[in-house]
Amino acid sequence: GLSTRRMPSGAGHDAQSIALFAPVGMIFVPSVAGVSHAPEEHTTPQDIINGANVLLRTLLELDRR
């Protein structure tokens, strides 16, 4: 399986506005060398696939409830 970590985010993503009305969560995928929000940011294809699968499983679980 994949490792997980709870990460409070101070970023002003759209989730910040939606959180006023409903619970929110964000799925973060690793960037090579930790570089984020920069032209040299890169995420491996496998990490992108893993993140997409986490989103899929989350949505399916929420729908099941």
Image (tube, helix red, strand yellow):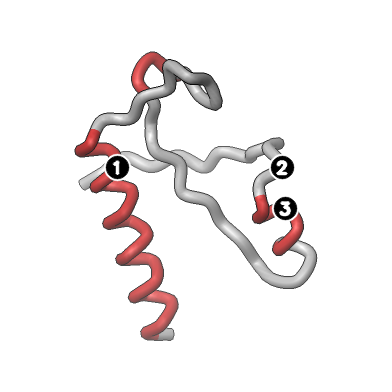
| Secondary structure of the residue carrying numbered label 1 | helix
The residue sitting at 43% across, 22% down in the picture is 41
Asked whether the residues under the numbered discs 3 and 1 touch, taking CB atoms below 8 Å apart as contact, a structural biologist would say no
| Secondary structure of the residue carrying numbered label 3 | helix
Residue at far right of view: 20
| Secondary structure of the residue carrying numbered label 2 | loop
Q: Which residue is mark 2?
A: 12
Asked whether the residues under the numbered discs 2 and 3 touch, taking CB atoms below 8 Å apart as contact, a structural biologist would say yes
The residue sitting at 56% across, 38% down in the picture is 7
Give the CA separation, mark 3 to mark 1: 23 Å
Occupied quadrant, residue 54: bottom left
Q: Where is residue 61 shown, x and y percent of the image? A: 37, 75
* First reached walking from the N terminus: tag 2 or tag 1: 2
Q: Which residue is mark 1?
A: 48
The residue sitting at 65% across, 66% down in the picture is 23
Of residue 44 and residue 54, the one placed in the foreground of this image is 44
Of residue 9 and residue 37, the one placed in the foreground of this image is 37
The label number, if any, that marks residue 28 in the structure image:
none
Name the amino acid type tagged 1. Answer: Ile
- Left or right: 23, with 32 as reference point: right
